[in-house]
Image (tube, grey):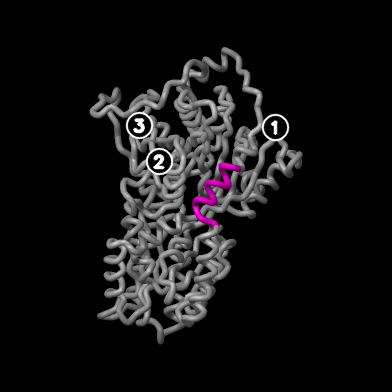
Amino acid sequence: MSRLIVVSNRVSAPEQPGAAPAGGLAVALSAALREYSGFWFGWSGETVETFTGEVHTRRVDEVTVVTVDLEDADYQEYYNGYANGTLWPLFHYRIDLTAYDRSFGEGYERVNRRFAGVLAPLIQPGDLIWVHDYHMIPLGRELRRLGVTNPIGFFLHIPWPASQLLTTLPRNRQLVEALFSYDLVGFQTDEWLWAFESYVLGEAGGAWGRDGRLEAFGTTLRAQVFPIGLDVEEFRALAASPVANRAYDRMAAHSVFRSLIVGVDRLDYSKGLEERLAGFERFLADNPELRREVLYLQVAPTSRGEVGVYQDLRARIDALCGRINGVYADMDWTPISHVHRTYRRDELAGVYRAARVCLVTPLRDGMNLVAKEYVAAQKPDDPGVLVLSRFAGAARQMGEAVIVNPFSREEISEGLKRALSMGREERVKRWEILMDGIRKSGVKAWRDSFVEALKASHEPRLPFIESPAILRVRGTLGAGPVAGPKPPVPSAAPGALKRNAKRRRPPPSDAVVI
């Protein structure tokens, strides 16, 4: 069997089953790599004074992890800058929050060259390379420039923006052209695929080629939909674990004689938290007879806390929760509990099982695995109800949820009331259909369908030819060797001396879709 090399910015295989925080990318890729030999490559989360390209290898829960440190300028320009300050808001349709800064784009290109220079010597003939998410769009091009001819696929975990939005990005054509260095590009839903095809055909002057391939920029690629899923049986086992049972008992005791409503989202403007709270406030105002019958728990772990827009968002969320509680709370009842800490997946599984309703109402989302985790955690004979945004990728697979427009506080209020008043028979019927769907579209189906499509999509490519002058310039940017023998993945040396003092950054949480 071919080795599978997974590449992403975030490298966070869980240390033990159930210990990982809720998140799509880490959980799905760990499950994939346990089935294949190979390794997971990306940023270590640490910065050094000078980039060296030194790799660090460790074994985590049956997954080999290979990481590299970045310079502080890399972190600021590539990670905080272009990835999270430019692409993330733009791809989530928040052009008002998008930062257009040339230095960010230069840092993004530089870091992808560096990643490619470190990774290329570790690639062996026959390896399959699977690159993930918006941080790494140019990586395929950089690997091709270094002579890598292996099959390389790319999967985007977040939405692809409409052409009218993408064209606001300086050098948008070069970003899309970089994707044509891949053999296969995958998207979560038809909507994001159609938006990509629209740009290629309309803005880039592309065309449909043979076998449904897209032709543009002098080459071809195959673009397809691969909706990400869960390891359903693993998650159901977590939901029945002792940790989950303790969490269930705590929440059941806390909400005794009341219906628990839960939301679990990374603190991000794309998740619609302010709109959701406004919808819950409208529910309390419209249904005074139900006020004391519900408790709303919102779990919103802080991410990118050093970025101003996220600091402002947290302050607004705190103020909104405080205002709603101040208006509606009584001496023995507070309608909203909100926490900003991270919980283990098995703890959350118990919370999901205790919740009568789960609110998943992002304004724009690639998929959203919390919706699927909530369904997987339910009791078959007495399941809760999922209230789901029509703008989450999961809505295209989960039509038996209560679908709402997250921009409408009235629809959120009405959807919540409908979910709380739904009888057991209807709840069971809806849950059975939802559960059947997430079983059929689990993480193994996602992984296997992408890998098989990558093998089928690969076509021999002529290597890039660059002049010695260009190669010298690339060398000064830390791209790494462009030729020579490829050593095996090095093993970690306990207590090895580092050539530069390191600073630990907050765990990157970018593409974790929760």
- CA distance separating discs 3 and 1: 35 Å
Which is in the foreground here, disc 3 or disc 1?
Answer: 3
The magenta stretch is 441-452
Query: How many numbered circles does the render carry?
Result: 3
Read off the residue under disc 3: 57
Nearer to us in this view, 30 or 79: 30
Q: CA distance from mark 2 to mark 3?
A: 12 Å
Q: Nearer the viewer, residue 407 or 390?
A: 390
- Residue type at mark 1: give it: Thr
Residue 408 visible, this angle? no
Quarter of the image with the C terminus is bottom left
Q: Position of residue 493 (x, y in %)?
A: 28, 27
Amino acid under label 2?
Answer: Val
Residue under label 2: 11
Chief SS of the magenta region:
helix
Vertical position of residue 436 compared to residue 23: above or below: below
Q: Quick one: which residue is furthest to the front in this view?
A: 1
Residue beneath the point at 61% across and 50% down: 225
Q: How many residues crowd around disc 1 within 10 Å: few (fewer than 14), some, or many (20 or more)?
A: some
Q: Earlier in the sequence, mark 3 or mark 1?
A: 3
Identify the residue position indicated by label 1 in the image. Answer: 219
